[in-house]
Amino acid sequence: MNVPEADWTTAVLWLAVVGSGIYHGLNPGMGWPLAVSAGLMNNSCRAVFGALVPLAIGHFLAMGGVLLPFGAVSALVTWQTEIRIAAGFLVIAVGLYLFVNRRHPRFLARIGPAHLTLWSFAVALAHGAGLMLLPIYLNLCRAEELDAGHIAARTLMGSNLITALEVSVVHAFSMIAAGGLMAFAVYQWLGPRFISKSWFNLDTVWPLSLILVGAVALYSS
């Protein structure tokens, strides 16, 4: 039985949303060490998972803050190719900037661990996490249009807004699931020495992945 190409495209794009969420979750820069810290400070495994909630909310707000405005743009119907090309160049530009400038923004240092939601939101925005999902989201909207055919702009806008929320939710859930497993493993079995002795930094891989996603978006446009 042959599966329509549009269905394969949609499935691959959703896998990319989940995969990037897992990638973010495993990145210690997105906050799972703070969940370990909360568990150690309170001597409670529940505190580890409790800290994951505001981290997930902050990451979700950052994703939605980037994607929802695009979902509300009715011009997406007419200018979808141009918007995808612009989004691809934007993601590449952010990746190049982060690759050259490795220092984290100074304003993040003034946000304490107690404000985990705000911290997670700020980090996700500063690292361009939402931008990475933008080309994927725009292509998901295109896949939906191929399946639905020609529909009214108002209906399409509503569909795009729902898609933006779905992408944000799926990505944030994947991110916090991966980060939560990492935090639980460090708290329960590996111990805090794992962070100091086996610290892995994705600051080089992250901008390169942004550039790759932007290049793929340009190619598909």
Image (cartoon, rainbow, N blue to C red):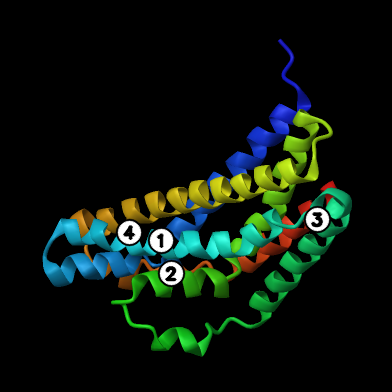
Q: Which residue is mark 2?
A: 120
Say whether residue 44 is left or right of residue 198. left
Q: Which residue is mark 3?
A: 84
- What quarter of the picture does the N terminus occupy? top right
> As shown in the figure, which amino acid type bears the numbered disc 2?
Ser
Q: CA distance from mark 2 to mark 3?
A: 27 Å
Q: Which residue is mark 1?
A: 57
Name the N-terminal-most of marks 1 and 2.
1
Name the N-terminal-most of marks 2 and 3.
3
> As shown in the figure, which amino acid type bears the numbered disc 1?
Ile
For the point 53% across and 45% down, the residue is: 18
- Number of dots carrying numbers: 4
Q: Which residue is mark 4?
A: 53
C-beta proximity under 8 Å, tags 1 and 2: yes
> As shown in the figure, which amino acid type bears the numbered disc 4?
Val
Q: Residue furthest left?
A: 43
For the point 44% across and 57% down, the residue is: 25
Say whether residue 40 is left or right of residue 175. left
